[in-house]
Every structure is written in C-alpha cells, then in structure tokens.
Amino acid sequence: MVVRSDNRSAHVKVLRSLGPEGRTLPLQGHVGFDSLPDQLVNKCVNLGFDMNILCVGETGIGKSTLMDCLFKANFDDTVHSHKSPGVEISEHIYNLKEGNVKLRLAIVDSVGYGDQINKENSFKPLVDFIDEQFENYLQEELKIKRDLVTFHDSRVHVCLYFLVPTGHSIRSLDLVTMKALDKKCNIIPIIAKSDTVSKSELDTFKANIMEELRANDVEIYTFPTDDETVAEVNKDMNEMMPFAVVGSREDVKVGETTVRGREYPWGVVEIENEQHCDFVKLREMLIRTNMEDLREVTHRKHYELYRRGKLKQMGITDDGAHPVSLQETYEQKRAEHLEELQRIENEMRQNFVNKVREKDLELKRNEKELAAKYEGLRKENNEEKKRLDEERKKLDDDLAALKKKREDLERANAEHANGQNTKSKKK
C-alpha cells in the first residue's frame, strides 16, 4: 500500500505489513531463478580463485616440502642458510588447475625466521606484510573506479605455523608471534617433523600446546560447525589440533606398493597413512573442506577489523547521531594536515632563529676573545720591543765605549812606538 505525503514533503513512503520476513507465495509454474546457484558456480569457475598461504617457521623445518606434498607439485625451492641477519618475506605465485577449476596460489615464506640471536622483533616483518596486503585491498575498495572482481586478492588467507617438535611445551617466540598474528589471519598450528617424537610424547605435546595457547589468549582458527554437512568432521578435527605432520618428496616401496614417505632403518613413515601422521587430515581440512571458509573469514573478520580501524583513523564513522561525509572528513583531515604543516613550519622557523641567535652570540663571544687576545699580544709585543730597544741601546753604548777604548789604546801604542823610534835615532 502506497501513501503519498502532503505538499511539504517530496518523499513517498511505502508501508509494508508483511512482517520482517515477508509473505510466502506459491508459484504457479517454473520461473527459473532456481538456476542462480549454477550461475554463481559458473561465474566463480570462470574467474578462478585466489589462495594465499603464509608459512611461518624456522629454516629447514620442512615448509617447502609440506607445500609440495599438499598440492602434489614441485614448487620453486630455494635453499636458505641460517645466517640471515633478519626476517625476510619471500612470495611465489603459481597458477594451478584441477579439472576446470583455476587456482592462483601464493606461497609466502618467512625466510630467516627464528635464526637470529635477538628474536625480539621477528614477528614484525610478518605483521607488516599482512597489513600491507590489507592496505592494498582497502585502497582498491576506496577507488572511484574499482574492480574488485578481477583485482588480485593478495590478503593472507591462512597462516601455517610450524612448531618445533620439542615434545614438551611451546616456545616463547612462538607464543609472541602467534599472539601478534591471531587478529590478522587464520592461524593453524602444525607440529613439523612429528616422526622425531614418540606417539605418547606427541599426545602430551599437543595437549600442552593447546593449554598454553588458551592460557595466553592466543586465538587460532577453528573449523566451522554451522554447516550440517561438515559439522561433525570439523568438530572432530578441532579436537585434534595442532596437526602433527611429516613431509617427504621421495617415493618409497612398501611391499608391492609405492608410497610417498620417509625411509628409516627401522621402517617407513608414510605421510598419507593416518596411523603415522595427520597429513591427510590437514589436507582434507585445509583444501578439500574449509578453503572457502578460510577466504570468507579473512574477508569478514580480519580484513573488516583492519578496515574499521583505518576508517576510524580517517575520521569516517557510521554513528547515526553524528554522520560524517567523506567531503567533511577530507576537509577536516586537510585542515588538520595544514595545521600540522604550519606547526612544523613555525617550529622549524623558531629553531632556525634560535640557532642564528646562538651562532651570533657565539661569534660575538669569539670576537671578544680574539680582541682580548690581540690586545694582550700587542702589549707583549710593545714590551718586548721596548726591551729589545733598551738592550740595543746598551749594546750600542758598549760598542761605542769599546771602540773609543780601542782608539785610545791604538793611539797610546802609536805614541809609544814613536817614542822608541826617537830614542833609537838619538843613539
């Protein structure tokens, strides 16, 4: 029922009395919108899917080997040393196809993680990388002309955290890193090289890990149980975490069968044997059952948390009592920015004036010191000159007296000689 308002209002109000969920009507024939799921599937298959996996763990713990086993492919494997000065992010993108489904897979490796003596900030490059991908997606969202359908989604959908099989408890480095990442991505803890500990030690280790994670409020990814088709298996798998896995690139013979595994003097560890490790369970949960949920949780939970914080920093709010438009936010931020620039300019000008004043005082002080020094040197020079003049006068007087004495002596000698000559002539 449509009710038109009076002349003072230009709005047309549509009043519905069907209830919050509307009214159910039977159809009198086939319409065709039951094909919407098929249309959606076809569209998604044509576009393909993105899956980005962050592997966190020490060098040599088996990250690359496990990726090869999970996707049954030989990815690029660069051998890294334990001498890296810091943690570096290495990303490789692969285009995979299974049947008619295309998957763009990004494997992100934490090169050098845990290899330094000082591990205090080992998690920071990981957090920076995740935030950078969120920021790229947010900037695409905020564009006037955006294309999120074909945009390469590089956000981290899952973090496989490789734990060292100590058999006792989780390390402080692992706790700190997972705590820094749990609000930014879906964390699935994995016990790597689980064939190095016994079955009983492994069960105790798993229990200790989960207990320490709960005690430190570290939130890991839990498989969803709201879908009835996978609720039961996901519930069982949640109770089995963390997964204890073994990876191998080698095929070994067990009787008449060739399997992927690791051969030891005492026997063979088959990676796809659920009695030997949890590799099959991990692959089932990660790829075959919950891959789309990982992508959805990344967008709905972790990205939304980042986006909300960024928009709040920009001054954008959805508070109905105080709505703020983008134009107002822009003008406000521009005014704040100009004010900050003016403050910095004034501060720099004042610093410059202070430095000039200080330099001027220093120059005047140096000038006074030089003048005093010059006056002192001048007085010393005059006194020295006076002393030298006196000594010179004295020397001149002595020289004149000596010269007079010499002349007198020469005259006396001459007179004496003349007297002797006179006497000789008389004789």
Image (cartoon, rainbow, N blue to C red):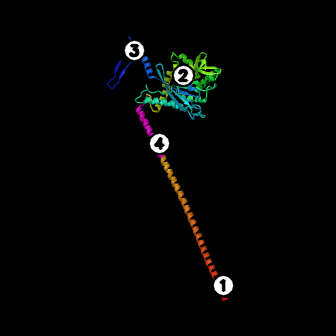
Q: Nearer the viewer, mark 3 or mark 1?
A: 1
Circles 2 and 4, Cβ within 8 Å, touching? The answer is no
Question: What numbered label is drawn on residue 32?
Answer: 3
Question: What numbered label is drawn on residue 344?
Answer: 4
Mark 3 vs mark 1, CA separation in Å: 168 Å
Q: Which residues are magenta?
A: 322-350
Q: Does residue 408 show up magenta in the picture?
A: no
Q: Residue extending furthest bottom?
A: 426
Q: Position of residue 406 (x, y in %)?
A: 62, 77
Q: Is residue 189 visible?
A: yes
Q: Position of residue 239 (x, y in %)?
A: 58, 19
Q: Earlier in the sequence, mark 3 or mark 4?
A: 3
Q: Nearer the viewer, residue 177 or 354?
A: 177
Question: What numbered label is drawn on residue 70?
Answer: 2
According to the picture, the residue beneath numbered tag 1 turns out to be 420
Mark 3 vs mark 4, CA separation in Å: 65 Å
Q: Position of residue 365 (x, y in %)?
A: 53, 55
Q: Quadrant of the N terminus?
A: top left
